[in-house]
Amino acid sequence: MEVKTPKTLREAITYFSNPDNCVTYMAAKRWPNGVTCPTCGSTKVKYDAKTWRWQCASHHPKRKFSLKTGTVLEDSPLGLDKWLPVVWLVTNCKNGVSSWEIHRAMGVTQKTAWLMLQRARLDVIACRDIQSYRCYDHCSRRGAARKA
Ligand SMILES: [Zn+2]
């Protein structure tokens, strides 16, 4: 499925303020060949539009999952509506982004904006291909391996 990519920060914020758009956008990036369960890899999953979550048809722990499940965003308290515009900014604004810009545009504190920016930059560097959210799976697997 082809998804539209916002052209400006204002457009990105408006676009990602709609949870349906976040799901459409990120699901298409993360699972270009269809949604798969992050725990067992099954494609037999059911989408619940009310909670923006999927449920795997197989019976195992953590059968309910969201877009953040199994990614580096999983432990982030920030919603995708805040996170995706920052990732979008870092990947699309080649001239650099300041935390003040994010602070003003998104109404988060400048400290939060700075932390988000650091993390988004690290993700971009670590993944190289941020356009593809499949990279998040690799990164989180690496993280899990390090902890083990
Ligand atoms: Zn499963």
Image (cartoon, helix red, strand yellow):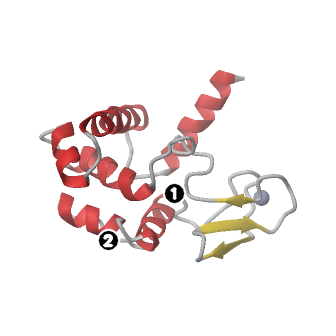
x and y percent of residue 113 in the render?
28, 40
x and y percent of residue 97 in the render?
18, 40
- Residue 4 is marked as 2
In primary-sequence order, the first of circles 1 and 2 is 2
| Farthest residue, direction bottom | 49
Q: Is residue 137 above or below residue 22?
A: above
x and y percent of residue 57 in the render?
81, 69
Residue displayed at 34% across by 33% down: 115
Three-letter residue code for mark 2 = Lys
Q: Is residue 91 above or below residue 44?
A: above
**Quadrant of res 85:** bottom left
Q: Answer left or right for 6 relative to 51.
A: left
Residue displayed at 39% across by 44% down: 129
x and y percent of residue 95 in the render?
12, 40
Alpha-carbon distance for marks 1 and 2? Answer: 15 Å
Q: Answer left or right for 141 relative to 24.
A: right
* Image quadrant occupied by the C terminus: top right
Can residue 45 be seen in this snapshot? Answer: yes
**Quadrant of res 145:** top right
Q: Report helix, strand or loop for mark 1.
A: helix
- Residue 30 is marked as 1
